[in-house]
Image (spheres, grey):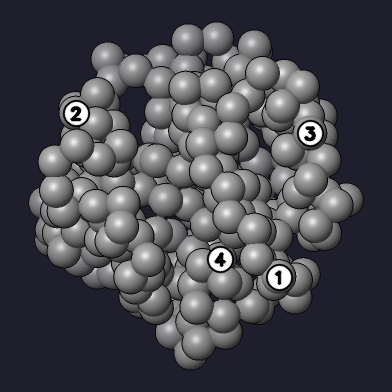
């Protein structure tokens, strides 16, 4: 059994501004727009990062869950942790453990080739946890939420290689990391869960914004170019991270 961190979803007041920052600083490209999110009062864009994705969503009307989240956390920030299960059975085991732990399913969609399972953020506390299954079982290729395979022509690794971890702040890191680990069927050590390609790191609240996805670890090919771009755009940064869309992007050297 393995689970891949395939997509990180951020939420922003202004979709164009958020995408502009991410593209200009990280050197990655927009690769897909999912019109299906319009029914939720949202607009979105996916960006290809390595073999995975950063998604940004933004409300288009009042009364949306994303809009309430923006208000609750006083601005842009991390929103969803979206994983890919290696088998349908792996995903169903996640659902069973979630149910037995009192974690509610926020939304579920089952199709022949794809099954989406989204767990409620009130129960997972720091973010939506989504575990999806794509019948191609391909961590490096086909991904239904990104439109299949067309995204591969938009991948640019000249500046940023991939993400390799996320940071979630919460009231009780030990307790919350144990809950996430149990639901995922994995171990937690020092409040960290290791997935197939990335780690989930739980920390105590570092600001007054409340629980949330507050950081993303990225492996970079050209750190200097990222920092110069951040400086030109007037973003908050230092030698270790850049702040965009209400999240710290931690700059890790390529292996």
Q: Is residue 116 left or right of residue 225?
A: right
Marks 4/3: CA distance? 26 Å
Query: Which of the two discs, 1 and 2, sits closer to the camera?
Result: 1
Position of the C terminus, as image quadrant, is bottom right
Marks 2/4: CA distance? 28 Å
Residue position for label 1:
112
Q: Is residue 76 left or right of residue 233?
A: right
Residue 74 visible: yes
Residue 66, numbered circle: none
Residue position for label 3:
96
Residue 71, numbered circle: 2
Marks 1/2: CA distance? 37 Å
Secondary structure beneath disc 3?
A: helix
- Sort mark 3 into few (<14), some (14-19) or many (20+) by Cα contacts within 10 Å: few
Q: Is residue 109 left or right of residue 57?
A: right
Marks 3/2: CA distance? 32 Å
Residue 255 visible: no
Marks 1/3: CA distance? 20 Å
Q: In the rendering, at what x and y percent does residue 60 appear?
A: 16, 53
Secondary structure beneath disc 4?
A: strand
Query: Which of the two discs, 3 and 2, sits closer to the camera?
Result: 3
User: Tag 2 or tag 1, which sits nearer the N-term?
Assistant: 2
Q: Are marks 1 and 4 in contact (CB under 8 Å)?
A: no
């Amino acid at each position: 059994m393995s689970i891949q961190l395939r997509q990180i979803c951020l939420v922003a007041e202004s979709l164009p501004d958020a995408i502009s920052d991410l593209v200009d600083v990280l050197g990655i490209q927009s690769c897909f727009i999912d019109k299906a999110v319009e029914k939720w009062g949202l607009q979105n864009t996916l960006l290809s990062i390595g073999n995975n994705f950063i998604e940004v969503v933004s409300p288009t009307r009042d009364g949306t869950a994303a809009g309430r989240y923006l208000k609750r956390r006083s601005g842009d920030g991390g929103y969803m942790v979206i994983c890919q299960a290696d088998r349908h059975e792996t995903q169903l085991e996640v659902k069973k453990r979630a149910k037995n732990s009192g974690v509610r399913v926020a939304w579920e969609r089952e199709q022949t080739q794809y099954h989406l399972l989204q767990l409620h953020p009130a129960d997972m506390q720091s973010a939506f946890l989504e575990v999806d299954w794509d019948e191609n079982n391909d961590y490096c290729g086909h991904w239904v939420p990104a439109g299949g395979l067309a995204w591969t022509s938009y991948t640019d690794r000249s500046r940023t290689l991939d993400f390799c971890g996320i940071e979630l702040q919460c009231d009780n890191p030990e307790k919350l990391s144990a809950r996430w680990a149990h639901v995922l069927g994995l171990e937690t050590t020092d409040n960290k869960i290791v997935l197939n390609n990335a780690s989930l790191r739980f920390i105590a609240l570092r600001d007054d914004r409340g629980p949330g996805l507050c950081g993303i670890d990225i492996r970079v090919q050209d750190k200097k170019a990222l920092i110069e771009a951040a400086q030109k755009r007037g973003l908050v940064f230092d030698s270790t991270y850049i702040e965009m869309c209400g999240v710290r992007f931690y700059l890790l050297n390529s292996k």
